[in-house]
Amino acid sequence: MNHYFHSIRVEPAKCAGHMKCLRICPTQAIRIRNRKATILEEKCIDCGECISICPKGAILPMTNPFGELIKFRHSIAIPSPALYAQFGREILPDRILNGLKKLGFDDAQDLALTCGEVSFAIQEFLREYDGPKPLISNTCPAIVRLIQVRYPNLIGQIMPIDAPRELAAREIKRQTSKRYDLREKEIGAFYLTPCPVKMVSIRQPAEKGQSHLDGAIAISDIYGPLLAAMEPLAKDTYRSSLESICILGIGWAIVGGICRTLRLRNSLSVSGLAEVIKVFDDIERGKLGNIDFIEAYSCLQGCVGGSLNVENIYSSHNKILNLIETLEFEKIKACPDIREVRKRFVEKYFFLEGKIEARPLKPLDPDLVQAIKKRKEKEEIFKLLPKIDCGACGSPSCLTFAEDVVRGEAGLTDCPFKYPEKIQSEGSKRSEEPPVPAEVAPFRPQINNKRKRGRP
Amino acid sequence: MGSDDVFTQAFEVTGGDFHKAGRVSIEIKETLQELGISPVVIRRTAIATYEAEMNIVMYAAQGTLHLALSPEAIVIEVFDRGPGIPDIDMAMREGYSTATREMQEMGFGAGMGLPNMKKNSDVFEIISAVGQGTRLRMVFHLGGRTAET
């Protein structure tokens, strides 16, 4: 089986088995085993919901520590536009970029301009495109993974234009190596990330061998030092600071930001994994063919909703909107040159460097006859369960528990409703819970036996 | 082959229940994924099942959808107690629809339902009696599987 890199790790020593992650995980990728959370590699799409909800801080994002920059002769910070939404109104991108340089980066580059270029490139692509619709934005790696795992049919509808962070890193590295006569290997490009999943797209890109970025630093890790490093606001610089902001790209930090720039008659913007799943279900059933483009994020409100941000997501969403309004009001339109974008589009500059492949979940059994048998067993086991999804067995719902049992990953005895005596004898925190009523139907052992016989 | 190799499931669909409409096709899709059926076959089955489900919701009082899956094929049978289709040939034409304007505004009734079911299935059979109901049978052959071993 393939090995999947994940940007989320459980610290067993800190995990107290509160099961909050078990319940919130949108892909049912968490199990509690021996009172500790474990993540199922195959199912996890790195959305980061579990990081935010864990009361013990036991689930950690595997971003790079700030000190990693010293590994490179020349280091460059490329902040997600979501970083711009973390500060007060008067702290504008150029001040933030300068602050980053003071923190020790040799250079800090604005990503909003590249976002604007990619908006133009997407427009160009849509103009000629006549394949199945709608096309789906690939900017959120959790969404790309969701499609690989749960909607393999929609892979052909993922927008083949690369994400701005990758294109920017490639371009900046090229230019920097020329200017300072460095090898590209000596240049470290670090994405300042609002969520852990970007780390996955850096360590294990969905489509190509290697990312152009060398690491990702959590916005939450850099926020404090950055706040201290920023210069006080100089007089009469507000207007000139505004002039450096790309009005097309700045909106990429929030849901709807891409669609706003595309001027399409029919496009959708969706955020929050549960909502995205509803929309993808509709696409898969042949609906929404009249929509040209869908921008989808696993985090509510888009990238400002990432679990590694500091500011609350509604304030930061509002901050980006205000900034766009101000730019419109001041009639400042610092945009990329569309003729330049068209030229490079023709040269295939913007396209993904590889193909995204499906990553379908493991079937109940590789052999269809066996799989059918197990599916029936699952049905029978599910009938016996209390169907209250208490999670005490360690699986997120009775249905997933039934599946775990037929897959041989859990035993029916793990259900405290079937085996109340087990829970009482454990002498753990759990045994303080009220005793379980005994009127549930007795366990029918033949199911378990059947399973054993069916297995080699 | 014995019935041991066949997985069956029945779903009740209530006419006029637009809120729950579409659940059956999602449930069937998830079952097919668990069994490792190829994504192409899953997509065709999901689209055809969804159309059949929506036809019950839009036109009939009540209906039942049966799934039978064997190692060779997926068979979907649909029975409904509804108005029936007076002229099946006409209903099979693309763009022909008896949907009300309200239904069309909700994005349904583009006159693609039956043609879509036929297009996506390998076998498509339909019998209808006016005033009684409609019976549908669709078969999807399982050419190959993409299951990982």
Image (spheres, rainbow, N blue to C red):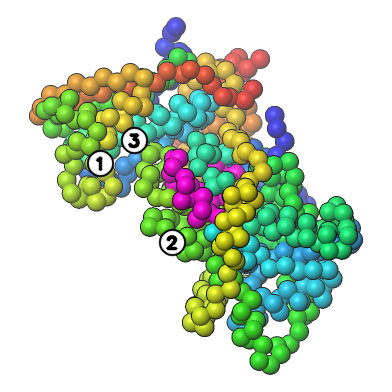
What is the CA distance from the residue labelled 2 to the residue labelled 1? 26 Å
Which mark is nearer the camera, 2 or 3? 2
Query: Is A63 left, or right, of A272 in this rendering?
Result: right
Query: Is A81 left, or right, of A218 in this rendering?
Result: left
Pointer 3 residue = B50
Query: Is A291 left, or right, of A396 in this rendering?
Result: left
Q: Is residue B122 above or below residue A302?
A: above
x, y percent for residue A324: 52, 75
Task: Identify the mark at residue A263; answer none if there is no mark.
Answer: 2
Residue segment shown in magenta: A121-147
For the residues beneath circles 1 and 3, the answer to whether they share a chain is yes
Circle 2 Cα neighbour tier, 10 Å, few/some/many (<14 / 14–19 / ≥20):
few
Q: Is residue A289 above or below residue A255?
A: above
Q: Of all residues shown, which one is farthest toward the bottom?
A: A235
**What amino acid type is highlighted by mark number 3?**
Tyr
Residue at 47% of width from left, 47% of height from top? A128
Give the number of callouts.
3
Q: Is residue A52 visible?
A: no
For the residues beneath circles 2 and 1, the answer to whether they share a chain is no
Pointer 1 residue = B110
Circle 1 Cα neighbour tier, 10 Å, few/some/many (<14 / 14–19 / ≥20):
some
